[in-house]
Image (tube, rainbow, N blue to C red):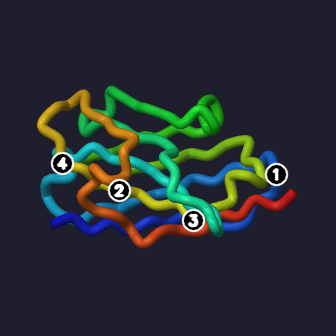
Amino acid sequence: QVQLVESGGGLVQTGGSLRLSCAASGRTFSSYAMGWFRQAPGKERDFVAAISWSGDITNYADSVKGRFTISRDNSKNTVYLQMNSLKPEDTAVYYCAAVLSTSEYYTTRAAQLYDYWGQGTQVTVSS
């Protein structure tokens, strides 16, 4: 069992930055590939970024590539999402998720494959 708790959301102006954190419980965090997803009001949950359990492989949605950076610190059981050059269309509830992985290179964009989810943190970008 893994419990995930996101933090770091808030209100920011266009062009600003935020760093989201996702703290995981459990001793096997390093066995999980991690992902960030977001859901805007009235829309489906969309993939944002993913990282392998080793941290060596990352994967980004085209809409955030070059602006967002996913990283992890396995010693702190935490995954991060650094968000720069924020736009109003980035406004959403952001969720982190974990999927058990046997490969240090594994990542996935498929929400249905993730085993555990956090409760979400709101990010609002004002124009």
User: Which amino acid does the dot numbered 3 rest on?
Assistant: Val
In the image, residue 40 lies at what x, y percent?
63, 62
Q: Quadrant of the N terminus?
A: bottom left
Answer with left or right where residue 99 lies relative to residue 49.
left
3 lies left or right of 90:
left
Local packing at callout 2 (Cα closer than 10 Å; few below 14, some 14-19, many 20+) is: many
Q: Quarter of the image holding residue 10?
A: bottom right
Residue highlighted by disc 1: 14
Would residue 43 be visible to someone looking at this image?
yes
Real-space CA distance between mark 1 and mark 3, rounded to the nearest whole angstrom = 17 Å
Label 3, secondary structure: give it: strand
Residue assigned mark 2: 97
**Element at badge 2?**
strand
Cα distance, mark 4 to mark 2? 10 Å
Identify the residue position indicated by label 3 in the image. Answer: 93
First of labels 1, 2 by sequence position: 1
Q: Given the image, on which type of amino acid does mark 2 rest?
A: Ala
Tell me, for residue 100, which label it has, or none: 4
Percent x, y for residue 56? 32, 27
**x and y percentages locating residue 45 in the rendered image:** 51, 57
Quote the CA–CA distance across marks 1 and 2.
26 Å
Secondary structure found at label 4: strand
